[in-house]
Image (tube, grey):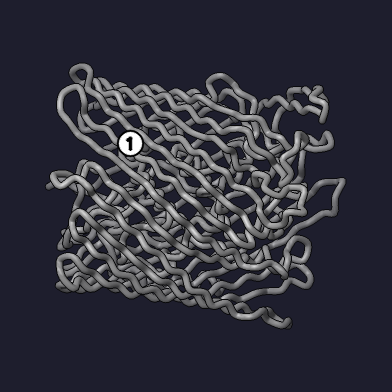
Amino acid sequence: MNRPSKILFLLLHISLSFGAYAEEDTDSAVTELREVVVTKRRATPPEVIPAQVLGGEELRRLNSNSVADALRYFSGVQVKDYGGVGGIKTVNIRSMGTNHTGVVYDGVELGNAQNGQIDLGQFSLDNMETLSLYNGQKSEILQPAKDFGSAGSIYMRTRAPRFNPGEKYHIRAAARTGSFDLVNLSALMELRLSKNVNASVSAEWLSSSGKYKFRYRRFNTSGQVAYDTTAVRRNGDINALRAEANVYGTLRSGNWTAKVYNYNSERGIPGAIVNNVWHRGERTKDNNTFAQGRYTGYFGKFTTLNNIKYAYYRTRYINNDDTQIKIDNLYRQSEFYLSSANEFEVNTWWRLSLSYDFMYNTMTADTYGFARPDRTSHYLSAATSLDFKRFKLQASALGTFVHDALKGQESPADKKVFSPAVYASFYPLRSTTDLALRAFYKRTFRMPTFNDLYYADMGNSNLNPERVTQYNLGIAYTRTGKGFFSSGRVSADAYYNKVRDKIVAYPKGQQFRWTMLNLGLVDIRGLDATAQLTVNPARELYVTLRGQYTWQRAIDVTNPADSYYRNQIPYVPHHSGSAVLNAQWRGWGLNYSWIYVGERYNQPENIRYNYMPAWYTSDVSLSKDFRIGKVGLRALAEVNNLFSQDYDVIVNYPMPKRNYRFTITVEI
């Protein structure tokens, strides 16, 4: 057994005896479920800044295969998709950059010190219970200190076992096939081990050739067609296996959980289509493993939340292109994370919290002259919340202390940053909380990643850390009713973000490698609007319409002498939105979803040569739920990109045309 395996085994043993969690407390305030199991827990106050949430049946109905696909239906979000089933998928909230987005998986934030980007394509919806998006931060002061440091956060919560009296186990299996030679099998088993301990084991296998037809059409500067051809995307295959195991327990004064996760994949990198090159020889092999434990204890007015995690990521990059230098590099990174958050309820309207996080990251590679950096990070936060029924206030302050050490080289200067935040909400109507006004101010900071700083062929050791200042003002109105009108909600938020020394990554021919640079100062102004309406026009017929719209002006205001001064930054459209229409009747479900992304540019200069046209897609699905004895079944047929639109999310990475998926799910 090698050293990483020994450490992983030791941490797993500690986590299993650690004691933490029955249901993740961070998301329960925003999740609507048919059944919520809570053990010895005080009520959570209403949120100061509500989240955008997809959960339960609504999440299952979307035409989405991965978490990244589902996030497209949130306002203010841009998903970068490099195409195909196995293409890398990252998310950007309000144009502040992927690295300012915290991604939390079952209560513990995911990390990647190498490039700071979490590939959301590796997380499936088959075992996902809720997805939540918070702008600024989650309005709960009992959270790890590191969670206060993100400009926006995505919380993923997997399904936790819930048993009715007499039940000992649940089993769910799904088989999916479709275009691109797709084969996708998943299984979930939930076990009731004792009165206070449950467990779950889930696994998923994904295989696809990644071959799909696309139309490649480009125009010259005069507007005439320069290229117009149809080809087949190649080297986009993927073979991936995800497996995870969870143990949940309840105690007399708290709850606990332990998780082990592994994602192993081999995939081709189709690369950009430039200079009439249609096939690439680049491939990556990833093996990502982590073990984490979580404990929540309730002791009168005092609550403690503790996390521990060890992660080991192994990436092998291979380039067999005959026209380039052959490459076979291996990168390893490890992470140890420890967190303790503590909250004290002074009285019914005032709470205080203090949190400390410790993180240690290392990275090695078999390339000549690699810097082999180590990073030690300390996070210390203090927060308070006031709840006066019609007026709620939350304030926090985060201190970040970062030290980098390089093997055989002079280490850069330590970083010490203070990040404050203030949130407020007001309910102007005395008799109801249907109408809410909200606002927040926040400053955030993020260190450049190891790739940004230390990679010889793409790093830039002179990069400055990014600093973001956020302002938000919003309004929301919610109503519920009976009869024809079931429920409705509308909300709108205006925001202003200023990003100093913004770091931007551009693919430079090879998708795995990037060119890094500081843009200097970026001015971001935007408006997010959402609406949802559910009606009951006939017996057993429910129709839900959900829509969102985002307007953004994100411009570079660094230097008036630059040719791109006050130009929109790359890949940020002025207008984007989505709409979902769902109808449910006697076990039948019809779902139509539409996504629109407006015109944008792929380089800092907003000129015709860098122009990318608007695109939109329509997806439709039909499902049927039925039972055979105690066995529940669901059949689902999907048509994605219904009108076979030609579009690129990233320039020269064409997306699939019309494609199909068919799924059978069995649940016992």
Write the residue at 53% across / 45% down: 121
Write the residue at 68% across / 57% down: 558
Q: Left or right: where does residue 607 sit relative to residue 579? A: right
Q: Position of residue 77 (x, y in %)?
A: 50, 44
Q: Where is residue 460 in the image (x, y as percent from the top left)?
A: 73, 65
Q: Where is residue 293 in the image (x, y as percent from the top left)?
A: 36, 67
Write the residue at 65% across / 47% down: 569
Secondary structure of the residue carrying tag 1 is: strand
Decide which of 165, 117 is in the foreground and name it.
Answer: 117
Please identify the residue farthest to the front as the structure is shown: 560
Picture quarter with the C terminus? top left
Regarding residue 238, the answer to whether it shows in the image is no
Picture quarter with the N terminus? bottom right
Q: Left or right: where does residue 473 sit relative to residue 540? A: right
Q: Looking at the image, is 174 positioned above or below residue 465?
A: above
Regarding residue 462, the answer to whether it shows in the image is yes
Q: Left or right: where does residue 471 sit relative to residue 465? A: left
Q: Which amino acid does label 1 sit on?
A: Val
Q: How many numbered marks appear?
A: 1
Q: Looking at the image, is 50 positioned above or below residue 573?
A: below
Q: Where is residue 218 in the image (x, y as percent from the top left)?
A: 77, 28
Please identify the residue farthest to the top as the structure is shown: 538
* Residue carrying label 1: 490
Q: Residues within 10 Å of mark 1 (few under 14, many from 20)?
A: some
Write the residue at 63% across / 48% down: 555
